[in-house]
Image: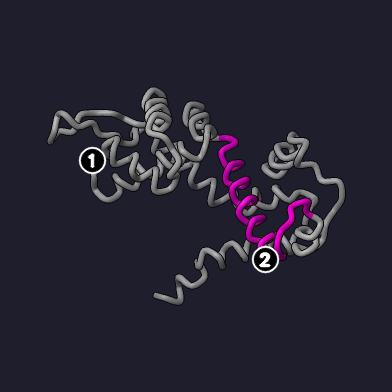
Amino acid sequence: MNDTNKVTQINKSIEKWEIDKKRGTLAEAVADSSIDFKDTSQGIEVLAYAATARALGLSNRDLQPRRLSNYLRSGYLQVQLISSVILFQFRGDKGVSRDDLYDSITDVFPAVTFANFRKVLATGVDSEIFIREKDPKDSRRTLYRISEEMMEPLTVYFSSVVSDFDQLFTGVFDGALRSEDIDNLQAYIVNRMSITGFDEKK
């Protein structure tokens, strides 16, 4: 079974994503939506974000080991925890304390309670995604770091997000938009992220 068929089956397994009729342009899709957007631009903005989040979620479909897959599928908080720990380690830290990690998470999700954060972090430790150990410089302090065993599957996951994104993004709109309009929506996302201006600033 190729990846396109996988994406189609995933989408069609969710009844509310079934498409009753084919739609043409982005403007028509926004106009035909049951959401009362104030204008076409707002509709495209919201559609672009929702489709991107959906496509990123689908990129996790074949991730191994299963404990990592299940952890990532549990929600955006889990993904942010992994990303934050990685970024702390990228700057040279041996690990990150629970308080510093919580501060990092609440920068992204201000409403996350400390109790919920602690529970999700503990699940990551139990699943051997994170390693918890004493700070060699201060035995009263506990540090969290990414398990070395997780680096290969995480590399596969992040690579698949990038390599499969076009196909997954297209699959989100199976039968709903013309291919050229899907390309237009992707271009819109790139422009909104100011990626196109990166080379010009060099």
| Type of amino acid under label 2 | Ser
Residue of label 2? 41
* Residue at 61% over, 41% down: 58
- Residue 39 drawn in magenta: yes
* Span of residues in magenta: 33-62
- Where residue 25 appears, as percent x and y from the top left, is 78, 63
Say above or below: 124 vs 173: above
Mark 2 packing: few (<14 Cα in 10 Å), some, or many (20+)? few
Tag shown at residue 70: none
Mark 1 or 2: the one toward you? 2
Whichever of labels 1 and 2 marks the residue nearer the N terminus, that label is 2
Name the residue nearer the viewer: 119 or 23: 119
Query: Secondary structure under badge 1?
Result: loop
Residue 128 in view: no
* Residue at 81% over, 56% down: 32
Say above or below: 201 vs 162: below
Say above or below: 177 vs 85: below
Q: Residue furthest left?
A: 137
- Where residue 172 appears, as percent x and y from the top left, is 70, 48
